Amino acid sequence: MTTITTRDGTHIFYKDWGPKDGQPIIFSHGWPLSADTWDAQMVFFANNGFRTIAHDRRSHGRSDQVWHNNTMDQYADDLAELIEQLDLHDIILVGHSTGGGEVTRYIGRHGTARVAKIALIGAVPPLMLKTESNAIGLPIDVFDGIRKGTYDNRSQFFKDLTIPFYGYNREGAVISEGIREEFWRQGMMGGLKGQLDSIRAFSESDFHQDLKAFDKPTLVLHGDDDQIVPIGASALSTVKIVKHAVLKIYEGADHGLTQTHQDRFNADLLAFINA
């Protein structure tokens, strides 16, 4: 397997497809998945001349399952080490859900010197959790429920989660058992401790200051029927901070739109990159 070793000794698995002299696109996955969730995008963009890279976040997929440091800051620092060790420049950063948080925190901690463009897809910033200053967030009970479901029986919880994740509980939805099984497979590859820690990381991390550091072309893309990361507290709030961002809303789309709306998403992302 292809890995880097971070400063704290953690092995991070990554895929590196396409021409090595192509402009790099780094894809950051959501919880509780792995780099595999981006395979279709990696093939599509590699066939369009880009170098496509996706890594398994620590304690997810094939990366080391660690007890400590499963935090948003560490996720961002791991991404920075991947970029530095591969000596990447002029990067397109693409983050979905928790991966959007990772990308955003990377910008906040490491800047945009190596970055060309940013795409946040169904992403968690600015803040998922409801607080006194973030009344449109989700109550802590929602995330406590995710923690309990993951701890008690994560195999069943991950299977059940696919229904709202992909909008399969909506009238007229065509359920793909293959997509559901693939979600479950990726989720079960990760470590329980790291996945539990990651729930706090994606729900309680406040990205307001990180978003203020965005100074490169930015795409914010979200489904308006996202049942996992509601659009109001995420995309619609993000574009109020990143005022130059392009907002693209998919009417009726779910959280897993990179798969359920794969061809449309690929085309829209390519158009943004080429603009």
Image (spheres, rainbow, N blue to C red):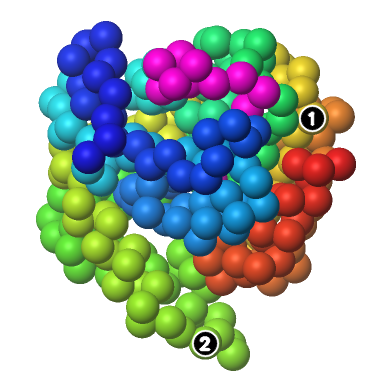
Nearest-to-viewer mark from 1 and 2 = 1
Q: Position of residue 232 (x, y in %)?
A: 69, 48
Task: Say if residue 136 shows up in the picture.
Answer: no
**Would you place residue 274 above or below residue 216 in this image?**
below
Q: Amino acid at mark 1?
A: Pro
For the N terminus, the image quarter is top left
**The magenta stretch spans residue 163:** no
Quadrant hosting residue 19: top right
**Residue sitting at x 67%, y 52%:** 48
Q: Position of residue 82 (x, y in %)?
A: 41, 22
**Residue sitting at x 67%, y 60%:** 265
Quadrant hosting residue 187: bottom left
For the C terminus, the image quarter is top right
Q: Which structural element holds mark 1?
A: loop
Disc 2 residue crowd, few under 14, some 14–19, many 20+, Cα 10 Å = few
Q: Position of residue 60 (x, y in %)?
A: 26, 41
Q: Amino acid at mark 2?
A: Val
User: Which circle marks residue 217 in the picture?
Assistant: 1
Dot 2 corresponds to which residue?
174
**Residue sitting at x 44%, y 21%:** 86
For the record, the magenta segment spans 82-96
